[in-house]
């Protein structure tokens, strides 16, 4: 039972390390320093996260942090995702979320 539990936990704890910006589609390989994520792992490039969204996730209203880079030695055992996610947000949705949260500190949202 212990081995199964550890395997199940790994499935739910590890980041997917998504391969692209969900808004513009820019490639964000696992070693990219240009990838930003929210607490739900919505993944965007730095430009979309900082400039277009002004550090407000258009899905959840959270903030963005640099996505960690999975060490090369661990990629064989725990590969990053190859499934591209493209969920371009409308300007209306982006503006709505920014209006709600941009003036509130992330730790107070």
Image (tube, helix red, strand yellow):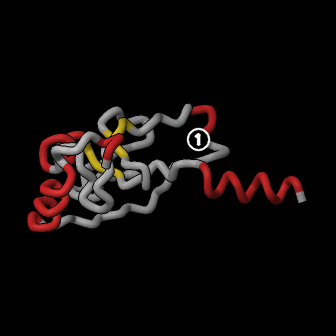
Instruction: State which quadrant residue 35 falls in.
Output: top left
Q: Residue at x 39, y 51 (%)?
A: 19
Q: Residue sitting at 19 percent across and 65 percent down?
A: 89
Residue 56 coordinates in the image, percent (x, y): 23, 49
- Quarter location, residue 11: bottom right
Could you tell me which residue is drawn at 12 percent across and 56 percent down?
99
* Above or below 108: residue 5: below
Total count of labels: 1
The quadrant in which the N terminus is found is: bottom right
Tell me if residue 46 comes above or below residue 6 in the rendering. above
| Residue 48 x %, y % | 19, 47
- 109 vs 93, left or right, is right
- Residue 50 figure quarter: top left
On screen, residue 59 versus residue 5, left or right, reads left
Q: Is residue 1 above or below residue 77?
A: below
Question: Picture coordinates of residue 84 (x, y %)?
Answer: 38, 61
Image position of 22 with respect to 48: above or below: below
Q: Write down the residue under mark 1.
A: 75
Q: Name the side, left or right, on which 105 lies relative to 53.
A: right
Q: Would you say 104 lies left or right of 106 here? A: left
Q: Nearer the viewer, residue 101 or 37?
A: 101
């Amino acid at each position: 039972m212990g081995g199964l539990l550890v395997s199940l936990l790994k499935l739910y704890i590890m980041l997917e390390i998504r391969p692209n910006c969900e808004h513009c589609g820019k490639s964000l390989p696992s070693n990219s320093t240009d990838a930003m994520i929210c607490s739900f792992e919505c993944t965007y490039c730095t430009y979309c996260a900082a400039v277009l969204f002004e550090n407000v996730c258009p899905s959840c209203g959270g903030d963005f942090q640099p996505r960690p880079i999975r060490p090369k030695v661990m990629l064989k055992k725990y590969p990053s995702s190859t499934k591209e996610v493209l969920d371009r947000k409308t300007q209306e949705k982006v503006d709505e979320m920014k209006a709600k949260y941009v003036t509130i500190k992330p730790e107070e949202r």
